[in-house]
Image (cartoon, rainbow, N blue to C red):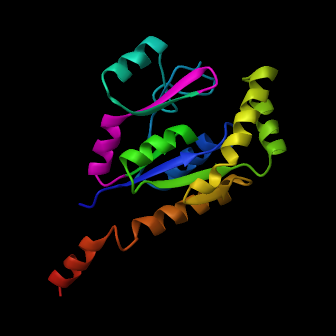
Amino acid sequence: MRRGLLVILSGPSGSGKDSLLEELMRRDEDVRVSVSLTTRPKRGWEIDGFHYYFVTKEFFQKKLDEDSMLEYAQYGDSLYGTPKGPVDELLKQGKTVILKIEVQGAEKIRALYPDVLRIFLLPPSLSVLENRLRLRETEDEEDIQRRLSIAANEITRATEYDYIVVNNILNYAVNDIAAILQAERNRASRVKYLISEVLQNA
């Protein structure tokens, strides 16, 4: 069995990462999304253990002390991190594992997995992004302005990624990422085993 494909998906808060990943998993049974730990409060529509594991800062620190996290980053006043064990197990099973992480966390993952595929999800504009944040009705004005400032900085680093996908219409963005994943799965450097199988079955 070939090793799975590890993918980083980054993008500003409000760029639509959760909605995109839910639709992508619905379409592709080989896609798995790594569930991150976070210390931020759960939003009303979120499911603990599906969107994130919502934990205390004390629990988060315990996992760091046990060296069981691939990476972690602070975003605003909250901590986010990726558990290591589930990611490595899914890769061994040949799954496509997507890490939904921030730009600073992406740097750490690339140092550990140099062949990781990096995709940046871009909003059509900052005004659209601001509107999406306001429609969520989960942040106060100070938090919205802080997220917009962080977003502007993150967007300047989008060119560090392998692909940039604009999320203007969700289905189109999902189509783009699905096509990227299929192309990367078929990359010759990843499927050399197929050549030997074909020759053996001649």
Identity of the residue drawn at 39% across and 57% down = 115
State the quadrant of the N terminus.
Answer: bottom left
Left or right of 106 on screen, residue 93: left
Report the residue that reaches farthest toward the left.
Answer: 200
Left or right of 94 on screen, residue 178: right
Residue 191 appearing in the image = yes
Identity of the residue drawn at 64% across and 57% down = 165
Q: Is residue 96 above or below residue 133?
A: below
In the rendered image, residue 87 lying in the magenta stretch gets the answer yes
Residue 56 appearing in the image = no
Left or right of 169 on screen, residue 42: left
Where residue 171 sits in the image (x, y, percent)? 66, 56
Report the residue that reaches farthest toward the right.
Answer: 127
Where residue 167 sits in the image (x, y, percent)? 69, 52
Q: Is residue 149 above or below residue 2?
A: above
Where residue 19 sits in the image (x, y, percent)? 62, 43
> What is the count of numbered marks?
0
> Which residue is more in the foreground, 15 or 44?
15
Q: Quadrant of residue 87?
A: top left
In the rendered image, residue 193 lying in the magenta stretch gets the answer no
State the quadrant of the C terminus.
Answer: bottom left
Where residue 160 sits in the image (x, y, percent)? 58, 54
Q: Quadrant of residue 63?
A: top left
Left or right of 37 on screen, residue 66: left
> Which residue is more in the foreground, 110 or 34?
110
The span picked out in magenta is 75-95
> Which residue is more in the foreground, 5 or 135?
5
Identity of the residue drawn at 64% across and 52% down = 158
Q: Is residue 40 above or below residue 135?
A: above
